[in-house]
Image (spheres, rainbow, N blue to C red):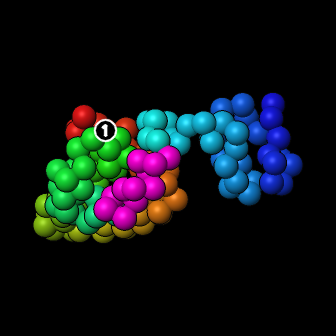
Amino acid sequence: MAYCRQCGAQLPDTAAYCPSCGARTAAGENASGQYGGTRSDIEDNKLISILCYFGIFFLIPYLTRPESRFVKFHSNQGLVLFLFCLISGAAAKIPVLGWLVGMACGVFGFVCFVLGIVNVCNGEMKELPLLGQIQILK
């Protein structure tokens, strides 16, 4: 077990961030996210990667920065979220039950949208809840 340099909390050996205070750990300094984006890749592509979560605009970063692992990761997450929103929007057209499902999916989609943008701004490559494990773009 390691200890956080910032707050002194006990950390799992593989933790990239302290669960108590959020400070980057020694393991986190060596690997910027589980998908291996380098620090310079992340810093250079943060702003454009925000577009990945605005619907079809995920294509702009994906096509303009094809060599960036950070952009590829967030483009995939944005594509999956976009498809989820399209499908839930189509389901919302079904009377009564579809409206309820569409409303719940809309709230979930908005939460994922916010989480995705927060992850980009923090330079993290965290998967979205429930949807993040789906890999379409390689």
Helix, strand or loop status at disc 1: loop
Q: In this view of the protein, which residue sits in the foreground, 18 or 134?
A: 18
Q: In this view of the protein, which residue sits in the foreground, 45 or 20?
A: 45
Q: Is residue 90 magenta?
A: no
Left or right of 137, for residue 118: right
At x 36%, y 56%, the residue is 45
Any part of residue 108 in sight: no
Image location (x, y in percent) of residue 115: 45, 60
Residue 53 position (above or below residue 126): below
Name the image quarter holding the C terminus.
top left
Left or right of 13, for residue 49: left
> Toward which corner of the image does residue 130 lie, by quadrant?
top left
Q: Is residue 46 magenta?
A: yes
Residue that label 1 marks: 134
At x 41%, y 47%, the residue is 41
**Extent of the magenta region:** 39-49
- Magenta stretch: dominant SS? helix
Q: In this view of the protein, which residue sits in the foreground, 37 or 95?
A: 37
At x 70%, y 39%, the residue is 26
Image location (x, y in percent) of residue 67: 27, 41
Q: Amino acid at mark 1?
A: Ile
Residue 120 position (above or below residue 137): below
Image location (x, y in percent) of residue 4: 80, 46
At x 44%, y 41%, the residue is 37
> Toward which corner of the image does residue 69 lie, by quadrant?
top left
